[in-house]
Image: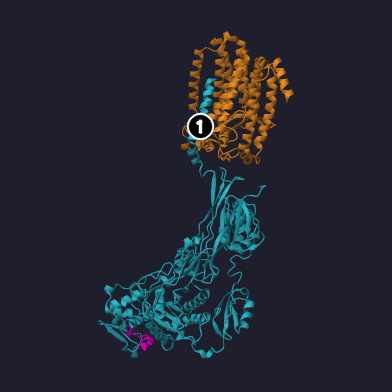
Chain colours: A cyan, B orange
Amino acid sequence: MLLFMVLFLVVIIKLFDLQVVQAEWLQEQATGQWTRSTTVAADRGSITDTNGIVLAQSGTADTIEAAPNEVTDPKGVARACAEILGLDYDTAYERVSDEDRSWVTLKRQVEPEQADALRAYNFKGVYFTVDTKRYYPFKRFLTQVIGYTTIDGIGQDGIEAAYDKYLAGTPGKLVYEKDSSGREIPYGSETYIEPIDGYNIALTVDSVVQSSLERAVENALEVNGAKTAMGIVMNVNTGEVLGITTKPDFDLNDPPRSDYEELQSLSRNRVVADSYEPGSVFKIVTLASALNEGVVTEDSTFDCPGYKIVEGQRIKCWATDHGHQTLAEGVQNSCNPVFMELALRLGNETFYEYLYAFGFGSSTNSGMSGESSGILRDIQYVQSFDLARIGFGQSVAVTAIQMASAASAAVNGGELMQPYIVKEIYTDDGEIITKNEPTVIRRVISEEVSATVREMLVGVVEEGSGKNAAVPGYAIGGKTGTSQKYEDGAIAQGKYISSFLAFAPADDPQFLVYIVVDEPTAGSIYGSTVAAPFAREVLEDLLKYYGVQPSDTAAAEDNVEVPSVSGMSLEAAREALEEAGLTAAADGSSGSVVAQSPLAGATAARGTQVQLYVSEPDEVYDVAPGDVTVPDLSGKTAGAAYAALKELGLTLNAAGEPQGVVVSQNPAAGSAIAPGGSVSVTLGEQEQGQ
Amino acid sequence: MAGFFSRLRERQKKKGHVDYLVLFLTIGIIAFGLVMLFSASFYYGLNRYGDGYHYVKRQLLGVLLGGAAMFVLSRVDYHVWLRHWKAIYAAGLVVLALVWVPGFGVSSNEATRWVEIPGIGLQFQPSEVAKYTLLIAIAANVSNFGPERIKSFRRGVVPLLLLMAPVAILIYLQPNFSMLVILAAACFIMLVIAGVRGAQLSIMLFSGVGVGSVFMLLEGYRANRISSFQDPWSAGASGYQLRQSLIAFGSGGLWGQGLGSSRQKFLFLPYGESDMIFAIIAEELGLVGAGLLVIAYAVLYSHCFRIAMRCRDMGGRMLAAGCAALLCIQTIVNMCVATGLMPTTGQTLPFISSGATSMVVCMAVMGLILNVSRTNR
């Protein structure tokens, strides 16, 4: 009896030990056992152009999976997969009939149309799950700059990689109570930690400019049978990159992931990454430096016997001889001895000061990934003949963006601007996280000298080697460039880099176009024929787009102001333009106008054709065709709402009591919204009655 | 109501009444047990049978049958059982042997402890019944021997040991070692009460403990259980149940998570609805609730022992004491296992753990004790 009572007492003492003394420690052992958390993916931010046109956006896609044990018709499934998804029939058959595995993935990120086609078969054991996919509506557009993500949506290259921390956002969490086998407990409590969506990035690039540049550079590549070609358009006054491209490129929606070498090569943003000898385009720098330093004046004259001997080295001019010429003629002729003379007159120290001041020898920090610094030979080892060569763009390696940025400084009034491509980083609510403003790095030359440089470069287009870039009626400045390629330190015979740099309008430059063609093989090697005609294509488009008036005013008597037609339907836009005395051309047959050229407010000659860019629903902006209907979420917990929306490819944006239920939602139930869209809900106290 | 109580008082004068404290404490514990079982078993039932009420329904059936048995046994004079002890004892052996009859025995976990009555699908543990039939046989014999013969080892103790042996062997063969130990302990207490000489008791105690220890260590799984009980946190899978049980106690704390708010019952704690229900109770109601339950049991059993001691008839005293000891030991063992004071065994908590057979038997046994209480004046 007494023994039993003692034993009961022992039990109570042990209870005290467990429930009071050890309680805290024991509870710690249970941490993590009772709850389970799942990650709620944050929406990756979009990348847009300067006008908000979407260049990269996350949307939904389907992942197609199968449970081999449930598949009743493996042959049929394999055939359909081969037909619709482009899978290999044998591989697909092997996978769906592999009964050792309970779950196999057939294909990830399948386009909605393909998934629907497969869905129509109603195969047993084939499952469709929602996946996110990065969509690039313009496909082969700004390829190397935007870059791409891994299949899991992590930035891998370009802006996608460099700004991944901004774009990615912070994943949220859904914590719910589970039983020991991991299933959610009915009526268990759950906590929803909202994901923070990634920020959006607006680039300085203008899609209209970019389209024009892409087309021209693609043409330059094709026509010249070149290895690569690149181009950049900059606003000379602000340093904004308006367009930038490297060809060949690829459709960002389908990077050639299987061939690593090829992908690396095609992803290289050569405009910032490749260093090359710029050739005569570099003479702009020499000219500006020499004029600014006063070692030469507009009245100086030179003699060209077809070569110049520097420290015993005979350095050839590109032509047999230019004879006696003024400085302006020397520029037009692109006469090498003239620029050797200028460089030598400046001397090592001074010329190098200018080179550094123009931004050579260091990365421009434009914000694009993989930027190189170019190569400036160490000043200690620069001999006179080296300096002379640098004068006309040899023995120096630059990147295209350095060249464009330096040339901008030479013609914009003398200030080196910080080149940049990211305009701003902002949230979905429009809150601006970072905004880049035009930044003056330094004044390099005086305004007067800059004006002289402009004038002389106009001469190149009007009278000299740049005639091919001339746009009738407009004053355009420019400079050609042709240089031999070096491979493994030696001149590579027959391999050239040909380029053309132009700016307009010449008296008050707004933009600069620089096109570089690497290894043209179709005959000509000179920048004047290889690159200039394509620069012209861009110039023409840009002059029109920005509504620049021809300086030759004879043609411009009857001018009208271009109305704004952005956002209008194509028909309405046509009417509005006709009313204003203009005509319209569109790049599509339906949809609404997203951009126009010339821009609204520009002056254009009566009868001018205004180019309209329309959104084509299935091609450009609407990433997944077909809207979805927003379900009724009221009374649901955050987790249930999240799941319901995920089914439809929508995302949840919750606020309020994390443990509450949905009391209001926006958009309302029943409204149509594009897949990938987000539904905002407010969570609150459950109304009575459960 | 008043009429009911006055009639009870009337009867008290004539035949003697049942011990109300024991009666109402038993009913109280059973009622409490049903509530806790509902809370503890809902998710297990939902999970295994798709019916959260599965265990509660069966338990209610057990309470109804057990209530009837308790009522009948409290009114049938226990001397009837003592007189027919031979038949009862034989029936117990037969039932135990059924385990080995093909078509009846049900094996699980390498032990054959259950019998299924073909056709009905009713399962029960024969040892649950047989241990009480043995007690009846011992009580009847001690009563018949009288106070002198029991002092003789050869004529008093040996016949009792011979009665125990077949039951013990059959239970050992199942095997159900923990049941055997509990039964042996209860029998030992009966021998003490019967008035067996102290020297003989000591010898039996030491040899019993010695033999028991040897058997225990002979089987690997028992030794294993002991090591995992000593340090469940580093015992891997074999320590899982105890770890989960301790977590339940710990998270209950002083005041508990609240009725119905156990987390461990979501399949974390194996047998949370049966052997380990004490842990779920402690988790939901805390030290306060679990402690009160322990006190309730302690009061209940001490009163049962008091009933036994007050009984002037040796047979009644032996019967009540044996039954009380058996229930009491089972209760203590269950609690010690749940709290990690003892290695894991499969003993249920009387009146609370799920199990209809156990409920019927325990209530019937309470009926016996109550019947004994009526003879006390």
Q: Nearer the viewer, residue A460 or A195?
A: A195
Q: In this rendering, does residue A134 appear at all?
A: yes
Residue B146 is situated, as x and y percent measured from the top left of the image, at 60, 9
Q: Which residue is pictured at 53% across the width and 30% down the height?
A: B337
Per the rendered image, the range of residues in magenta is A326-339
Q: Amino acid at mark 1?
A: Phe
Hey, which residue is sitting farthest top in the picture?
Answer: B148
Position of residue A432 in the picture relative to residue A675 (left or right): left
Residue B178 is situated, as x and y percent measured from the top left of the image, at 54, 26
Magenta span contains residue A223: no
Hey, which residue is sitting farthest front in the picture?
Answer: B2
The correct choice, above or below, for A178 with respect to B13 in the image is below
**Magenta stretch mostly in which secondary structure?**
helix
Query: In what element is the residue under mark 1?
Result: helix
Q: Nearer the viewer, residue B159 or A500?
A: A500
Residue B317 is situated, as x and y percent measured from the top left of the image, at 61, 16
Magenta span contains residue A334: yes
Rendering quarter of residue B346: top right
Q: Which residue is pictured at 68% across the width and 18% down the height?
A: B17
Q: Which residue is pictured at 64% across the width and 34% down the height?
A: B35
Position of residue A669 in the picture relative to residue A611 (left or right): right
Hey, which residue is sitting farthest right in the picture?
Answer: B3
Q: In this rendering, does residue B175 appear at all?
A: no
The correct choice, above or below, for A535 with respect to B32 in the image is below
Residue A212 is situated, as x and y percent measured from the top left of the image, at 51, 77
Q: Which residue is pictured at 59% across the width and 72% down the height?
A: A615
Hey, which residue is sitting farthest left in the picture?
Answer: A312
The correct choice, above or below, for A190 with respect to A425 in the image is above
Q: Nearer the viewer, residue A442 or A620?
A: A442
Subunit under mark 1: A
Rendering quarter of residue A652: bottom right
Q: Which residue is mark 1?
A: A16
